[in-house]
Image: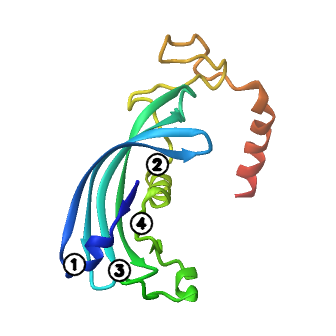
Amino acid sequence: MRYNVVQLLKEPAGSFRDYQVDEEILLEAGVRERVEGHLQLTRSNRGIWVKGELVVALDFVCSRCLKSFRHPVKASIYEEFRPMLSSKGDRVLTDLEAEEGILTISERHILDLEETLRQSLIVDRPLKPLCHAECKGICPVCGSDQNLSPCHCEEGAKNPQSAHLAEFLPRMGEQL
């Protein structure tokens, strides 16, 4: 997701370009995913303002039943990128300014959105992904997938691996 913005940088503030995105990008080492959506690049008085909505289908593990599934994640991008050089080749940003976290356009006037998209996808991922809203999960006693068939464990059955923790409940009640 690289865009040459030299012509846009030569235009007055308020000029813009619209882009339909449909391409593959490298999200992680060895993992390429298709990105689709819309971007608008607008010339601001200091650089290029990028506004867009992009969708990427990612792999998740359901937090209830532990099955793998793919789910689309919508990433919103609202960022300003500042040029390292003017369109005439004059230095605009000092090295110190570039190191302070300002998003920059390369010295060749290439605006690269891949890292910005990766960071946005990290923020927009669901905290507890679910394969579907009605997922019943796994039985805490026998570990069977309750979406496939209900288990026959007793309602009040306890997990033998954590049974020793139940001994502390009466003692905790005495201290409260």
**Who is closer to the viewer here, 73 or 166?**
73
Classify residue 154 as left or right of residue 84. Answer: right
**Who is closer to the viewer here, 103 or 174?**
103
**Who is closer to the viewer here, 127 or 140?**
127
Mark 1–mark 2 distance (CA, rounded to whole Å):
36 Å
| Residue that badge 2 annotates | 125
- Which sits earlier in the primary sequence, circle 1 or circle 2? 1
**Residue 34: x percent and y percent?**
41, 39
Amino acid on which disc 4 is placed? Ile
The reply to whether dot 2 and dot 4 touch (C-beta < 8 Å) is no
What colour scheme has been applied to the protein in the rendered image?
rainbow
Residue at image x 47%, y 17%?
147
Residue at image x 48%, y 28%?
69
Nearer the viewer's eye, disc 3 or disc 4?
3
Residue at image x 41%, y 53%?
1
- Which sits earlier in the primary sequence, circle 4 or circle 1? 1
Q: Quadrant of the C terminus?
A: bottom right
Classify residue 39 as left or right of residue 96. Answer: left
Mark 3–mark 4 distance (CA, rounded to whole Å):
11 Å
Mark 1–mark 3 distance (CA, rounded to whole Å):
10 Å
Mark 4–mark 1 distance (CA, rounded to whole Å):
16 Å
Amino acid on which disc 3 is placed? Ser
| Residue that badge 4 annotates | 110
| Residue that badge 3 annotates | 87
Amino acid on which disc 1 is placed? Glu
**Who is closer to the viewer here, 83 or 129?**
83
**Residue 115: x percent and y percent?**
50, 59
- Which sits earlier in the primary sequence, circle 2 or circle 3? 3
| Residue that badge 1 annotates | 11
- Which sits earlier in the primary sequence, circle 1 or circle 3? 1
Badge 3 element: loop
Nearer the viewer's eye, disc 1 or disc 2?
1
